[in-house]
Amino acid sequence: MHKHLNRDDCVCIALLVRKQETCTSIADAIGVHRTTIVRELEKNSDPSGHYDARRAHKRARERRKYAKVKYRLVETDTSLQQLIHKQLKKRYSPEQIEGRGVSVSFMTIYRYIERNPLLKTYLRRRGKKRRRYGTKRIPSRYQANKRSIHERPVLTGLGHWEGDTIWGKERTWSILTHVDKISGYLVASLVRHNSDMVHIHTVRYMKKLPCFSITYDNGSEFALHRMIEKDVNTIVYFADAGSPYQRGTNENTNGLVRDYFPKGTSFVTITNTDVQRVVRILNNRPRKRLNYLTPREVFENKGVRLRC
């Protein structure tokens, strides 16, 4: 069945097209059928064959917005529109309007209101959506494809990382951190807070280091985790929602980083050089849990064997 692609899908497609991957391998990476990728490239590539993720997503949203306008029941019937407006102004709900003999269903009326947001002011709850108690949200494809931390084997040796991001004041920039679970060795970088940049920076330094697994939290910035797995040749796991203790080494290290960049700090005013200075300080600070060796000494195997 054909699936609508979201922004992260478009970014993923653009990156893989740039690497000259086949439609089949791109489809496998984002969890859709091959024909979905073929249609996407045919519709949204420019005449020269270049595929731009931002333009593709914008055009897709415009097509969905104006799709089948001429077939919409309410928009094509002026008298029906006037009747619905009149009833809404009387504070009738869409179900009550349907119950009074209008020729369309209440769901059709709700969809009409969604396309005309000013009409929401006449609804009792102003169009706010509420989830019924006890129900679960349907996970996205990325949520469904996530590998749970409960599937992770017992970790031994170096090269098993925990990752997260530290937000700046503007919430447009963040510090991407990865911490080796055994040694506490930190690698970090100042990045734009989106999945594309997280993928690029993770691959950039993780390909140079031993990396057998990475455990993340559930932030949307890690949506391209399948691409990280492929490009770094590692396995990505995700901690349970609301369970930061499952990534304790990373959470503790983020707290140490926050000593230098407190909450409320504008990350627009700092540079990656500032971040790397803090990384060097923390990697060369002795730790009690490492028998007062530094994370760098342990990670580079310059220290004695650790006490179990």
Image (cartoon, rainbow, N blue to C red):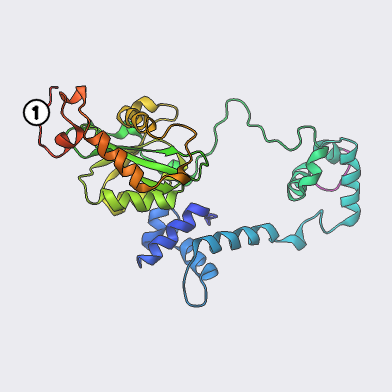
Q: Residue at x 64, y 58 (%)?
A: 64
Please tell me how crowded label 1 is: few (under 14), some (14-19), or many (20+) other residues with Cα within 10 Å.
Answer: few
Report if residue 145 lies within the magenta region.
Answer: no
**In the depicted structure, whether residue 146 falls above or below residue 22:** above
Rendered image quadrant of residue 143: top left
In this rendering, the answer to whether 226 lies above or below 237 is: below
Q: In this figure, which residue is indicated by the disc labeled 1?
A: 305
Residue in view at x 48 percent, y 77 percent? 48
Residue 186 in sight here: no
Pick whichever, 33 or 5, lies toward us.
5
- Does residue 37 appear left or right of residue 181 in this picture? right
Q: Secondary structure at mark 1?
A: loop
Q: Amino acid at mark 1?
A: Arg
Q: Position of residue 51 (x, y in %)?
A: 48, 67
Give the camera-side residue of 303 and 72: 303
What percent of the width, then of the height, locates residue 66?
70, 60
Against 149, is 144 above or below?
below
Q: Is residue 272 visible?
A: yes
The secondary structure that most of the magenta stretch takes on is: loop
- Tell me which segment is drawn in magenta: 100-104
